[in-house]
Each structure stands twice: as structure tokens, then as C-alpha cells.
Amino acid sequence: MTDNLSPADTAKLAAAERAVSFVQDGMRLGLGTGSTAAWMVRCLGRRVRDEGLQIVGVPTSEHTAVLARAEGIEIVTLEEAGWLDLTIDGADEFDGDLNLIKGGGGALLREKIVASASDRMIVIADAGKHVAQLGDFPLPVEVIRFGWQSTRDQIAELLEEFDVARREITLRLRDDVPFVTDEGNYILDLELGQIADPRHLALLLNQIPGTVENGLFIDLCDLAIVGHVDGNVTLVERTEDDDGFDNAV
Ligand code: 5RP
């Protein structure tokens, strides 16, 4: 599994291995989506096979479900699991408060539902995903197909009121046709450059009719495990201040 890895994969695997060390017998897990999360699923599969680890997983995409089954991980629905002990997922960007942009792989809706139904969320990522301010990575917004142009126009109007560096909105395509999510929706990618107030933007985006969910994950992540190309990892934890607000350490 680990022969001749590229530096990028070495970093992803290092983060995935550390994250999987937090998994204990009997846990109900949210299984993220993307290339880093795929390493986590493989590491988890190895623990299931080698140690007889007893866990169940709720996959955040059809793609992850296929991989998890192939790795011998028992898959259940979120309804069957009821609640999750831990979700491990990748991210496209994370800031010092452990707020995230997710959805580069198009799975943000299930990812957010699963993360918010978990006691704890761990993000695994390479060092390049750690940013001072969110927004360089285009922000994915999942929208209903019906009337998506009208939804896009209302998002454009909303962005006029926001402190962002750019305001470009693109319908995500795959093979020259609109990309369709596992839930049958479209994705609009918002090129914003910098988002001064991601918390406020996340709230207002979801009030626009036709918007299903946005890729800003606010106050959901508890720990980021950052993988490095030399195989080391750094942990960035969210702690609670006296005033009740969370900050990374
Ligand atoms: C999918 C996601 C992924 O977690 C995110 O895109 C990171 O992917 P990768 O680990 O391949 O860089 O949010 O919707």
C-alpha cells in the first residue's frame, strides 16, 4: 500500500495514519471523501483486517462507500448509526480557527450532515491547505437544478454586500456537462479570493431559495492533522476560551 509514494501521498498517508490511531473498538465513524480521506479508509481497513477492529462507517459519498466495502469496513446508513463518535475527512482549506472550505470533490452536503452528526471531527490535510484566511480555494455551493440560474443570480447579489476579493461564480462541469452530486444537485463554485467573514456568509448563503448547502464548515472541526512530505505530522487543536468561543492553539 505504501511503496513508491509521491511526496504528496506520503503527507496524506501520514495524516491518515495518525487520524486512524484515534479510532477505538465499537466506534461509529463518518468516512470522508477525497484523496486524503481515501488513505484514511485504507488505513482503517488495514486495522479491521489486522487487529479485528470492530467499527461501522457512514460514507459521505458513493465513491467512499465502494472503497470502504472493498476494504472490509462495515457500512451503515446514518439512520442506522443514529449518531457518530468521530468523523475523519479531508478539506480544501482550513484556517487558524479550524473553519474549513470543503466540497472540492462535490460531496459537501453529505459531508456536512455527517460531520454535524458526530461528537468529533478530525480533518486530515497536507500543509498547503492551512491558510490565514479562507477563500483562495473556490467555495462550492450545492444548488437544486431547478432554476439554478436564478439561484446563481441571487448569490451574486448577496456577494455584492460581502467583503470578498473577487466575485466569480461558475457552474461546475465534468466532461463538458454539469457535474451532478450524489444527491442529484448542481455545484456552483464561488471564486472569492478572500472571505473576511465566513461565518456570516455561510448563514446567508443557505437562506437563498435553491441553495441546499455551502462548503463553509464553521465550528465543526475539532482537530486538524497536517501531514508533511517527510512523513511527520502536526496537530492543530481547537480549544475553548473562557468566553465560550473556540480558538485553535
Ligand atoms: C470532497 C472534499 C474533500 O475532502 C476535499 O476536496 C479534499 O480532497 P483531497 O483530500 O483530495 O485534497 O471536501 O467534497
Image (cartoon, rainbow, N blue to C red):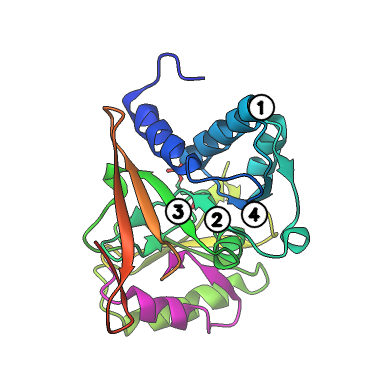
On residue 86, the disc is: 2
Q: Is residue 87 left or right of residue 25?
A: left
Q: Nearer the viewer, mark 3 or mark 4?
A: 3
On residue 49, the disc is: 1
**Any magenta on residue 215?**
yes
Label 3: how many Cα within 10 Å (few below 14, some 14–19, many 20+): many
Whether pointer 3 and pointer 1 mark residues with C-beta atoms closer than 8 Å, the reply is no
Q: Position of residue 106 (x, y in %)?
A: 55, 53
> From what the image shows, is residue 241 above or below residue 91?
below
Whether pointer 3 and pointer 4 mark residues with C-beta atoms closer than 8 Å, the reply is no
Label 1: how many Cα within 10 Å (few below 14, some 14–19, many 20+): few
Mark 1 Cβ and ligand 1 under 8 Å apart: no
Label 2: how many Cα within 10 Å (few below 14, some 14–19, many 20+): many
Q: CA distance from mark 2 to mark 3?
A: 7 Å
Of residues 43 and 214, the one drawn nearer to the viewer in this rendering = 43
Range of magenta residues: 195-218
Q: CA distance from mark 4 to mark 1?
A: 34 Å
**Which residue has dot 3 on it?**
122
- Dot 1 amino acid type: Arg
Q: CA distance from mark 2 to mark 1?
A: 20 Å
Q: CA distance from mark 3 to mark 1?
A: 23 Å
- Dot 4 amino acid type: Val
